[in-house]
Image: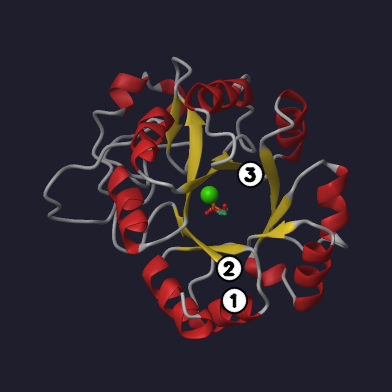
Amino acid sequence: MTLIFGHRGYSLIAPENTMTAFIKAEQAGAEGIELDVQLTKDGELAVIHDEKVDRTTNGKGYVKDYLAQDLQKLDASYTFKGLEETPRIPLLREVFEWMKNNEIICNIELKNNELPYEGMEEKVIQLIREYHYEQRVIISSFNHYSLTHFYQLAPDIETAPLYSSNLYMPWTYAQAIRAKAIHPNIRTLNNHIIQSSLESGVSVRPYTVNKEKQMRWLIEQKCSAFFTDDPKKALAVRKEIVGR
Ligand code: G3P
Ligand code: CA
């Protein structure tokens, strides 16, 4: 069955990459969430998509120049107005704490393709080990050097390359870098890639799938999972096709 992952949480109805968005995705019935991590000045893993805080918060500047405690004072409401509580930028640890009370799978995207974030892989592994979440996380990145480094440090934790151009035989590429899955942009995907990957034991989880027609196609193809801003819609489509 195709699993549904809330992209940056349930980002259609809540500020992306906030606890509210993750909680809403889980409550909607999504099997997974996707989130992005950056490193603060004091080396904490902060859950935010951009290198800078400008787009999604009321602050300015780079995440790497903020202490975690100052970063967490920012208002992360993004474009959402009149919320009951001011959403904050969570630390990955807070998300992991919340995961103790549910069975959600967490795709952690390492946002180290723009800034190198030395030591990020080690910090993520340490936290996963502390919580024993080896089977509940998937590590992805557009930085494939980082993924191979991650694999060398923690071969038991699943990695998956993100990509947005038309790769030739991406399932063999995934195997070459010891990844268990591919996370392609939906625009690069076709039936041949889905089926060849699945037959090779490589999971396929495209992003970002918000159109009903594309959801339907992926579910009918028995694609492993997909990332969507609207998990409720995806779950309704899946229920219609496979009954759950
Ligand atoms: O992990 C899939 C997707 O999140 C990658 O793109 O820009 O939304 O982080 P982006
Ligand atoms: Ca992402």
Observer-side mark, 1 or 3, equals: 1
Q: Which residue sits at x=37%, y=51%?
A: 16
Residue 177 position (above or below residue 186)? above
| In-front residue for pair 78/162 | 162
Disc 3 marks a residue whose amino acid type is Ser
Q: Secondary structure at mark 2?
A: loop
For marks 1 and 3 on the same chain, the one whose residue lies earlier in the sequence: 3
Asked whether the viewer can see residue 62, the reply is no
Give residue 54's quadrant in the image: top left
Q: Is mark 3 within 8 Å of ligand 1?
A: yes
Disc 1 marks a residue whose amino acid type is Ile
Query: Which residue is the site of mark 2?
Result: 2
Left or right, 149 with respect to 212, comes to right
- State how far apart marks 2 and 1 are (Cα): 6 Å
Where residue 184 appears, x then y in whole percent?
A: 68, 60
Q: Are marks 2 and 1 in contact (CB under 8 Å)?
A: yes
Q: Which residue sits at x=69%, y=47%?
A: 160
Callout 3: 10 Å neighbours few (<14), some, many (20+)?
many
Query: Which residue is the site of mark 3?
Result: 140
Residue furthest out toward the top: 42
Callout 1: 10 Å neighbours few (<14), some, many (20+)?
many
Q: Quadrant where the N terminus lies?
A: bottom right
